[in-house]
Amino acid sequence: MDPKDALREEHGATMKMLAVLRRLMTKAVDLKEGETKDLEALIEFFDVYVDRYHHGKEEQVLFPALSLTLAVRIDSIIDSLIKDHREARTIMGQIRSKAVTLHSCSEAERYELKERADLYVDLVRKHIRKENSELLPLIEERLSEPERLQMAGQFQNVEKATLGSSGVEIFLVSVQRLSKKYTLQ
Amino acid sequence: MKVKIDYDLCMGDRNCHKVCPEVFDFDEDQLRSIVRVDSVPAHLENKVRKAAEECAPGAILVEE
């Protein structure tokens, strides 16, 4: 698959899971057992699929390739995107810590969890829109077809290294299940 | 036909604007798509359906 299309699809799956996280967190104070499991599945998705796999493709392959094209402003855009990745990683770490001890969390701590989750959703939504608007068009503008083909191969290597033999399928099933459960499409 | 955008899902890739610029516009400040019309003219309905099909997160909601 063309690198731009692959990243665009991953952004789509991520937007769906951000919407699920926001809806789930409206009940943060009173999560039922099944919903706690859904929160764990969401954290796994954002840790592995979004951060290790998707951000891995961007940071190890896409950003260095675009940086080499010396496009105007590209380095400042990439710096700002990497900063977003780091911030998202930090916030997700805080969410994970709270989720692990959720059964013993006070009401105030559960509100804190919701506040962290809202922050994460806002940050990543804005980040995806920024990438789609400013970064992905550069793949077609700046990279030749052979370069894009090579990039597709490098993306597959990142997939193997980050997801192993199980691949993306398990995460896409999770997106479908949770989107349906929380009344999205 | 009516069409609206779920802003929780719109990822701002401008694809809908490319497919049907007569109906979809792009908000450069918010980096997300907007709908320009109250109801979709009949001759543009197929283009709007195509835009909805191609929207990866399913942010375009079509009411037939």
Image: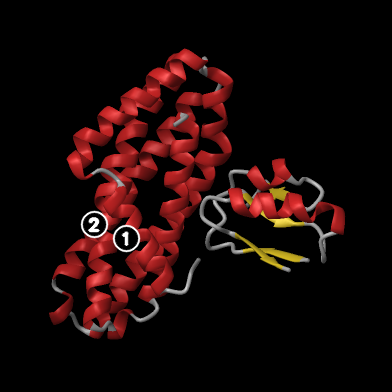
Q: Residue at x 15, y 68 (%)?
A: A100
Q: Is residue B32 above or below residue A150?
A: below
- Residue A12 lies left or right of residue A159; in this view the side is right
- The quarter of the image holding the N terminus of chain A is top left
Between circles 1 and 2, the one closer to the viewer is 1
User: Chain for mark 2?
Assistant: A
Q: Secondary structure at mark 1?
A: helix
The kind of residue on which mark 2 rests is Glu
Q: Disc 1 marks which amino acid? A: Ser
Q: Residue at x 47, y 29 (%)?
A: A2
Q: A132 left or right of B46?
A: left
- For disc 2, the marked residue is A44
Q: Is residue A123 above or below residue A161?
A: below
Q: Is residue A19 above or below residue A49?
A: below
Query: Residue A110: percent from the left, percent from the top?
Result: 27, 78
Q: Residues within 10 Å of mark 1 (few under 14, many from 20)?
A: some
Looking at the picture, tell me which residue is in the foreground, A105 or A18.
A18
Whole-percent x, y for residue B62 in the image: 68, 64
Q: Is residue A149 visible?
A: yes
Q: Where is residue A148 drawn, in percent x and y?
A: 45, 21
The numbered disc on residue A174 is 1
The disc placed on residue B19 is: none
Whether residue A70 appears in this view of the structure is no
The residue positioned 70% from the left and 48% from the top of the image is B26
Q: Position of residue A69 (x, y in %)?
A: 48, 15
